[in-house]
Amino acid sequence: MKSFIFLGIITALLISCNVSPQQIEYGTDACHYCNMTIVDRQHASQVVTTKGKAFKYDAIECMIHSSQEELKDTKIALYLVADFNQPGQLMDATSASYLVSNQISSPMGANLSAFENEKAAQKTKEKFTGELFSWEEIQNHLKQ
């Protein structure tokens, strides 16, 4: 009997600390940073802490600003961004490529979009113009 109780407690602890993204409810969920309703599937983003708490954002720039400010001392397990070419599909922000283009509006005005890889970002840049960034570079760019 004790082993069943112990197993139940361990299972509950593992489930409560599940480090995985939460589904974004577009049109319902609010951005953690600016409190706007999240509606744009091409620019949404999310961070998940090492304790499993998820923060949802309406724009990549909101996620980055939040990470640089209020969450700067929080251990983050996942940084996720929507793939511009696959709206609503979240991908690893740290391996994505970024395009800042005045011809592609993002919800908070940074004109920032994410792409699965540099080739996809370059292809979109050829169509819309702009400047390409890596994960590290876009964080520094948004500090300015």
Image (cartoon, rainbow, N blue to C red):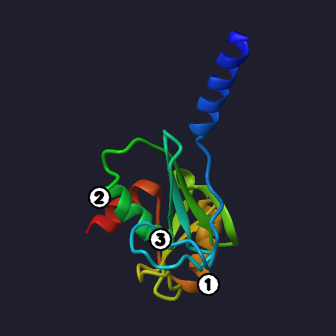
Q: Position of residue 23 (x, y in %)?
A: 66, 61
How many numbered marks does the figure carry? Answer: 3
Q: Pick out the residue farthest to the bottom.
A: 103
Residue indicated by mark 3: 31
Q: Pick out the residue farthest to the left.
A: 144
Q: Residue at x 47, y 71 (%)?
A: 31
Looking at this view, is 124 or 114 the one in front? 114
Is 71 rendered above or below residue 89? above
Is 102 rendered above or below residue 72? below
**Left or right position of 17 against 133:** right
Would you call the spot at circle 2 few (<14 residues within 10 Å), some (14-19), or many (20 or more)? few
Q: Amino acid at mark 3?
A: Cys
Would you call the spot at circle 1 few (<14 residues within 10 Å), some (14-19), or many (20 or more)? few
Question: Please, what secondary structure does the residue beneath circle 3 have?
Answer: loop
Residue indicated by mark 1: 127
Is 123 rendered above or below residue 102? above
For the C terminus, the quadrant is bottom left
Looking at this view, is 17 or 109 the one in front? 17
Q: Residue at x 56, y 71 (%)?
A: 29
Q: Earlier in the sequence, mark 1 or mark 2?
A: 2
Q: CA distance from mark 3 to mark 2?
A: 15 Å
